[in-house]
Image (cartoon, rainbow, N blue to C red):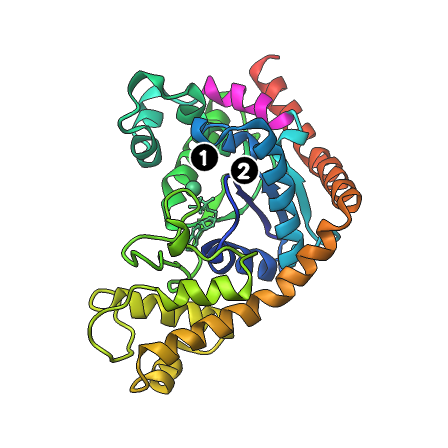
Amino acid sequence: MTRVFSGMQPSGDPHLGNLLGAWVNWVAMQDDAECIYCVVDLHAMTSPAEHDPATLRQRTVELATGMLAVGVDPERSILFVQSHLSEHAECTWLFNCVAGFGELRKQPQFKEKSEGRGESVSVGLFDYPVLQTADILLYAADEVPVGEDQRHHIELARDIGQRFNHRFGEVFTLPKAVHPEAGSRVMDLQDPTRKMSKSQSSEKGIVRLLDDPKKIEKKFRSAVTDSATDIRHDRDDKPGVSNLLEILAGATGDPIDKLAATYDGGGYGPFKQAVADAVVERLRPFQDRYRELEADPGEVAALLERGAERARAIAAPTLERAKQAMGL
Ligand code: ADP
Ligand code: NA
């Protein structure tokens, strides 16, 4: 059976982009793959602005709760917190001695995130893709579902794995990135030319999964569209309207063409209201389930502990073989 690994950083409250771009896929993949999902708290520490210890601890539990609420099934899949296992950090060191300074320095995400921060940028941020390589290779994952922005990191993981195998013997399975189909990229409601993001969007531009219906309506009402009135899908000409159509399609499951035909001619007001209503409906079961889980933190902690044990059962033997291969 195909094995899938994916992780998400507890770096802020999850939003509609995380749901439609990642979690919907995560849940669906459980039907035909062995899935391992991880709250990558060690990764979240690489961003100094966000690393407040109490906040990190809280967001880690909240993100895991969100994953459970959205439908990650802790029986069929393995759900765990990265730092609950020491194997990830340990394997990162092994890979640090295989990865090249030059290939890390060139990573687009590092360049982007370190820009303007000069010498104060942390070694952790630099090493982020090596930790990610450890996450993936420790589980012999075949597929890693990620956004387009993570493509380079998966290529790097393959390179490091391949180099390791070449130098020390076949220990690691080389993963393949799988990208969610087009249309699942949710854009900022205030600036539909860039993606909705926990770290970059203003509060008005981002729909949080736990926003109440009033807040959701308000955000969609003030979503940026354009000065015309037609409703059709054209990302270049009409990025705002196209984004709303995609969100509506994601929330309802209806095809974009059909939705465009339904709402075209009726004006932006009713269209935005329809998108808001659909999103509120889509999020309702998630929010209800989240509140139930939140009321039972002991249960969530127990599930994560069990998840960590199951993860360790896979990761520990892999790490042991890698250490042996390297002469440790
Ligand atoms: P953020 O940019 O909000 O911090 P992350 O980088 O933590 O999000 O991404 C977590 C997952 O959610 C990734 O799989 C990523 O591709 C997906 N994702 C994040 N933002 C969006 C978006 N706006 N549209 C679609 N998918 C997204
Ligand atoms: Na991010």
From the viewer's side, name the closer residue of 226 and 33: 226
Q: Residue at x 57, y 65 (%)?
A: 283
Instruction: Pinpoint residue 138: horizontal percent, then vertical percent.
Output: 59, 33
Q: Which residue is mark 2?
A: 136
Task: Give the left or right position of residue 86, taking residue 134 as reference.
Answer: right
Q: Amino acid at mark 1?
A: Ala
**Is residue 31 something one can see in this rendering?**
no
Q: Residue at x 34, y 81 (%)?
A: 260
Which mark sits nearer the N-terminus, 2 or 1? 2
Vertical comparison of 33 with 36: above or below: below
User: Based on the displayed image, in which of its 4 quarters is residue 59 positioned?
Assistant: top right
Q: How many C-alpha atoms fall within 10 Å of the one at disc 2: few (<14), some, or many (≥20)? A: many
Q: Which residue is mark 1?
A: 157
Residue 94 in the magenta stretch? The answer is yes
Per the image, label 2 sits on a secondary structure element best described as: helix
Vertical comparison of 228 with 181: above or below: below
Disc 2 to disc 1, C-alpha distance = 8 Å
Q: Residue at x 42, y 55 (%)?
A: 206
Region in magenta: 87-98
Per the image, label 1 sits on a secondary structure element best described as: helix
User: Based on the displayed image, in which of its 4 quarters is residue 261 positioned?
Assistant: bottom left
| Residue 259 tag number | none
Cβ–Cβ under 8 Å for marks 2 and 1: yes
Q: Amino acid at mark 2?
A: Ile
Residue 320 in the magenta stretch? The answer is no
Instruction: Pinpoint residue 196: horizontal percent, then vertical percent.
Output: 39, 53
Vertical comparison of 312 with 233: above or below: above
Vertical comparison of 79 with 118: above or below: below
Instruction: Pinpoint residue 232: horizontal percent, then vertical percent.
Output: 28, 77
Instruction: Pinpoint residue 309: horizontal percent, then vertical percent.
Output: 75, 36
